[in-house]
Amino acid sequence: MTDTINYANLMERAENAARECLESADSIDGAFDLAAESCDWDWVIYYGMSMELCQSVPGEILDNAEFMASDCAMVNIDTTLYEHAAAVAFCIVHNAVFSSLEYLATQTAEA
């Protein structure tokens, strides 16, 4: 897998993280608990990568992540640009992993 930060690689990494959560957990609920802990990627913790991720996703995904960061009080008036980008990047990753996990859980339940 490449280290290039783009939407396709985001979704690939998210699906891989979701698969690992499903394989490691005893239940779907357990997988979701693990997923919450699996979102601290290098793309989230390094400011430059966070900024790049925010610039690399479609507008709707960025908007949803910005709303989530604001709604969860992850950003405020004192938040720096880089801290804001890291919070939004975390929400982007979180939403991608949870979306992948929901899809995989549905596929598992149907099989």
Image (tube, helix red, strand yellow):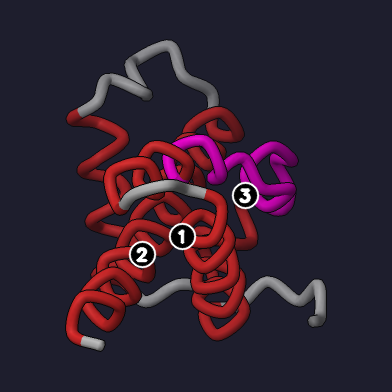
Q: Mark 1 points at which residue?
A: 22
Where are the magenta residues, as a range? 35-49
Graded by Cα atoms within 10 Å as few (under 14), some (14 to 19) or many (20 or more), the crowding at tag 2 reads many
Q: Which of the marked residues, 3 or 2, is nearer the chain's N terminus?
A: 3
Which tag is nearer the camera, tag 3 or tag 2? Answer: 2
Q: Where is residue 93 in the image (x, y as percent from the top left)?
A: 47, 55
Q: Which mark sits nearer the N-terminus, 3 or 1?
A: 1
Compared across the picture, whether 22 is left or right of 58 comes to right
Judged by depth in the image, the label closer to the viewer, 1 or 2, is 1
The answer for how far apart the CA atoms under marks 3 and 1 are is 26 Å
Depicted 86 relative to depicted 100: above or below: above
* Disc marking residue 50: 3
The residue at the far right in this view is: 2
Q: Is residue 54 left or right of residue 29?
A: right
Horizontal and vertical percent position of residue 100: 37, 70
Decide: marks 1, 2 in contact (CB < 8 A)? yes
Q: Which of marks 3 and 1 is in front?
A: 1
Q: Which amino acid does label 1 sit on?
A: Leu
Coordinates of residue 110 in the picture (x, y in percent): 18, 85
Q: Is residue 43 magenta?
A: yes
Q: Is residue 82 left or right of residue 109?
A: right
Frontmost residue, 33 versus 46:
33
* Image mark for residue 101: 2
Quarter holding the N terminus is: bottom right
Q: Where is residue 17 in the image (x, y as percent from the top left)?
A: 57, 61
Q: Which image quarter holds the C terminus? A: bottom left
- Under circle 2, the secondary element is helix
Give the residue displayed 56% in from the left and 28% down from the top: 83
As rendered, which of 88 and 93 lies closer to the eye?
A: 93
Answer above or below: position of 32 versus 37: below
